């Protein structure tokens, strides 16, 4: 990455997960060990999946005993639900007892992990199960990286892609999200272009994110083609008009030279009509973007419905006629409540 949010520290405060080779080399020296043990520690944490320093057989026995209680920062699997399509939803228990969700999504050629960035979510989007449960706290860097390692270990397959689309609003936890992006790229070995950060849109945060000039994909949860409908779905849209959000998105594209993906949940009879498609195309005219249409995934608290296949295709056709790049993302893991908008920490 051109910017490294997780800078070399003069003193490492455990948990150790999320630290780089350089950080870990400094830490082992602070413990009176030679610097090369930092590389060994890095390998055991990120590639061998060690959960206790006491289990690192490459270390001297006496030192292992001395550092046995130093936390690496791994969670435990509290519950695991497997959908018929192979998608697995995990409830992970953190050190303080909080429960978060992460999802492993396998296909023939890749394994994608949908990670959470907060315990709960403060955005309270009307169609989203996570927002209905309220907000508790931000996740730390190690708690984000751990989700990817957990899925990788459980599937026994290398993770190829990570999407920050689980519980929470990533740009309200920017420092830890940036640090976890760095670690996933440099320590876990996932390419920047295989990392996607989703946001509902927080004033000025998209431009702040742009200044890091990362090669990750930014996905903006739009969900409506005008301010009136957006306010009904997303309470945070009230003080942040759609026009201002789109202006910030245009500036992001100019700074990064990277196109933005716009997420648009299709709700039958609410935002899926032909005039909505025309409004959406007009909003996005003139800069690099791509629309991901997501047919609504049901939750118990609201009465929104998923559009018919014909209605979805009609919406797609109008966007294509207007020269708007578009695709339909049919969510995986629906039967396990692991699809987009269905995540909630419960069991």
Image (cartoon, rainbow, N blue to C red):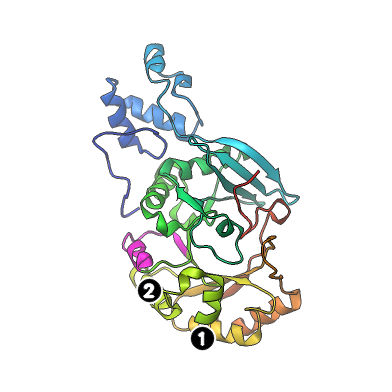
CA neighbours of label 1 inside 10 A, class few (<14), some (14 to 19), many (20+): some
Q: Look at the numbered discs 1 and 2 and tell me whether their residues touch, using CB distance below 8 Å.
A: no
**Residue occupying the point 49% across, 83% down:** 283
- Residue 285, percent across and down? 48, 83
- Residue 4, percent across and down? 31, 50
**Residue occupying the point 47% across, 72% down:** 237
Q: Compared with residue 183, is residue 268 higher up or lower down, i.e. above or below?
A: below
Q: Label 2, secondary structure: give it.
A: helix
Q: Which residue is mark 1?
A: 282
Q: Compared with residue 240, is residue 159 higher up or lower down, i.e. above or below?
A: above
Quadrant that contains the C terminus: top right
> Of 40 and 299, which appears nearest the observer?
299
Q: Is residue 226 visible?
A: no
- Residue 277, percent across and down? 60, 83
Q: Compared with residue 257, is residue 97 higher up or lower down, i.e. above or below?
A: above
Q: Compared with residue 165, is residue 309 higher up or lower down, i.e. above or below?
A: below
Q: Is residue 19 left or right of residue 327?
A: left
Q: Which residue is mark 2?
A: 248
Range of the magenta residues? 204-218
Residue 317 falls in image quadrant = bottom right
Query: How many marks are shown on the rendered structure?
Result: 2
**Residue occupying the point 41% across, 57% down:** 172
Q: Is residue 318 left or right of residue 243?
A: right
**Residue occupying the point 60% across, 49% down:** 103
CA neighbours of label 2 inside 10 A, class few (<14), some (14 to 19), many (20+): many
What separation in Å lies between label 1 and label 2 (alpha carbons)? 16 Å
> Of 69 and 154, which appears nearest the observer?
69
């Amino acid at each position: 990455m051109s910017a490294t949010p997780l800078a070399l520290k003069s003193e490492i405060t455990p948990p150790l997960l999320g630290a780089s080779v350089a950080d870990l080399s400094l830490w082992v020296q602070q413990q009176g060990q030679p610097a090369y043990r930092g590389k060994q520690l890095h390998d055991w944490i990120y590639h061998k999946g060690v959960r206790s320093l006491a289990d690192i057989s490459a270390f001297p026995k006496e030192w292992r005993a001395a550092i046995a209680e130093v936390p690496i920062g791994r969670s435990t699997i509290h519950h695991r639900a497997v959908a018929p399509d192979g998608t697995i939803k995990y409830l992970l228990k953190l050190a303080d007892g909080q429960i978060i969700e992460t999802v492993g999504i396998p296909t023939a050629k890749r394994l994608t992990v949908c990670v959470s960035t907060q315990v709960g979510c403060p955005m309270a989007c009307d169609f989203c199960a996570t927002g209905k449960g309220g907000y508790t706290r931000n996740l730390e860097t190690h708690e984000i990286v751990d989700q990817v390692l957990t899925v990788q270990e459980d599937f026994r397959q290398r993770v190829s892609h990570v999407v920050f689309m689980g519980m929470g609003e990533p740009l309200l936890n920017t420092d830890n999200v940036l640090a976890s992006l760095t670690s996933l790229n440099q320590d876990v070995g996932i390419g920047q272009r295989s990392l996607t950060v989703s946001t509902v849109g927080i004033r000025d945060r998209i431009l702040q994110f742009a200044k890091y000039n990362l090669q990750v994909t930014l996905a903006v949860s739009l969900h409506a083609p005008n301010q009136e409908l957006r306010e009904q779905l997303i309470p945070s849209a009230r003080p942040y008009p759609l026009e201002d959000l789109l202006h910030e998105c245009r500036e992001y594209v100019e700074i990064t030279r990277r196109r933005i993906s716009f997420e648009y949940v299709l709700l039958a009879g609410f935002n899926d009509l032909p005039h909505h498609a025309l409004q959406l195309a007009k909003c996005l005219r003139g800069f690099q973007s791509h629309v991901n249409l997501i047919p609504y995934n049901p939750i118990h608290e609201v009465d929104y419905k998923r559009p018919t296949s014909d209605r979805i295709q009609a919406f797609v056709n109008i966007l294509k006629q207007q020269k708007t790049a578009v695709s339909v993302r049919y969510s995986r893991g629906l039967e396990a409540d692991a699809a987009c908008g269905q995540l909630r920490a419960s069991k």
